[in-house]
Amino acid sequence: MILQDAIDEFLIYLTSVRTLSENTVIGYRNDLVHLTDFLEKDASVESVTKEQLMTSIGYLSQKKMASASINRYIAAVRTLFAYCKKVGHIERNPALELKTVKLPKRIPKYLTENEIDQLCSMPTKKELLWENRDKAVFEMLYSSGCRVSELANLKFSDFTDGFHAALVRGKGKKDRYVYFEEDAQKALKNYLDDRRKMFVDLNMEDTCDYVFVNQRGGHLSVRGISWILSRYFRIIL
């Protein structure tokens, strides 16, 4: 069977049997174009060798294709030949031992001190969401260096020595103390004043032990804090 015919059959299989989305199938098709471009147009699927596939990967690398794109190509080739082996088009799978290329490590982006100051003042300037609560979130994250998940799960019972320090549970269920500077403590107290007033206005009893709550009085989850952060980050970055 000609390689192109095998690819066409494989794409139909992805659509009709595996019921993958149209965009996913298009992605497979686009990746496999590199294979047919590299090999002869009338190459048979049975004649493709491991060495040819490895050379095609090197060819894409020489063309300065991104490592992530090369790995996507390798995944598509693996899936194609696994299908061909399954349906009996080939006796031996030449893509079985293909290995992905190493992805370059990206240097994480850090906020500058000026950007941190902008972020902490943003709730007051923009009057978005809940001003005092959001400012307390930013100040406490910045002051303590704790993770979003640790802050979201912070309870009043975790605090020691007033609001100066708290015991949090991090990765691996390891407990540690984090410390809050004066600005963070002040922002937290302002938020707690708001919180008490909110529960009075809602005519609800404040029984939530979690420090941060949403505007309905429920626990503000990790997802909720992450969403708040993303709203403000889009403004300053």
Image (cartoon, rainbow, N blue to C red):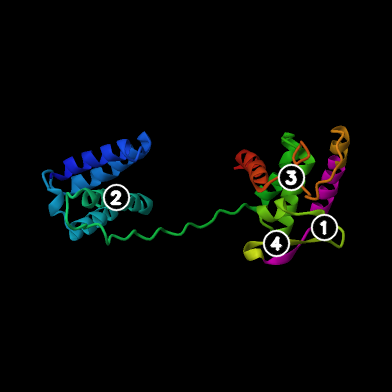
Name the amino acid type tagged 4: Arg
Q: Is residue 62 left or right of residue 150?
A: left
> Which label's residue is closer to the chain start, 1 or 2?
2
Cα gap from disc 2 to disc 4, whole angstroms: 42 Å
Cα gap from disc 3 to disc 4, whole angstroms: 17 Å
Q: Which residue is mark 3?
A: 219
Task: Give the magenta part as a residue range.
Answer: 174-195
Instruction: Check if residue 101 falls in the magenta segment.
Output: no
> Which label's residue is closer to the chain start, 2 or 3?
2
Which one is nearer the viewer's eye here, 20 or 104? 20
Magenta span: predominant SS is helix
Cα gap from disc 1 to disc 2, whole angstroms: 53 Å
> Which label's residue is closer to the chain start, 3 or 4?
4
Q: Which residue is mark 2?
A: 79
Callout 2–callout 4 Cβ contact below 8 Å: no
Cα gap from disc 1 to disc 4, whole angstroms: 13 Å
Name the amino acid type tagged 3: His
Q: Quadrant of the N terminus?
A: top left
Cα gap from disc 3 to disc 1, whole angstroms: 15 Å
Which one is nearer the viewer's eye here, 138 or 222? 222
Q: Which residue is mark 1?
A: 157
Q: Residue furthest left?
A: 42
Q: Quadrant of the C terminus?
A: top right
Name the amino acid type tagged 2: Thr
Tell me the residue at 72%/35% (across/down).
128
Instruction: Check if residue 194 falls in the magenta segment.
Output: yes
What SS does tag 3 mark?
loop
Q: Which residue is mark 4?
A: 169
Question: Residue 133 — which label?
Answer: none
Residue 46, given in percent of the width and then of the height, sits at 14, 52
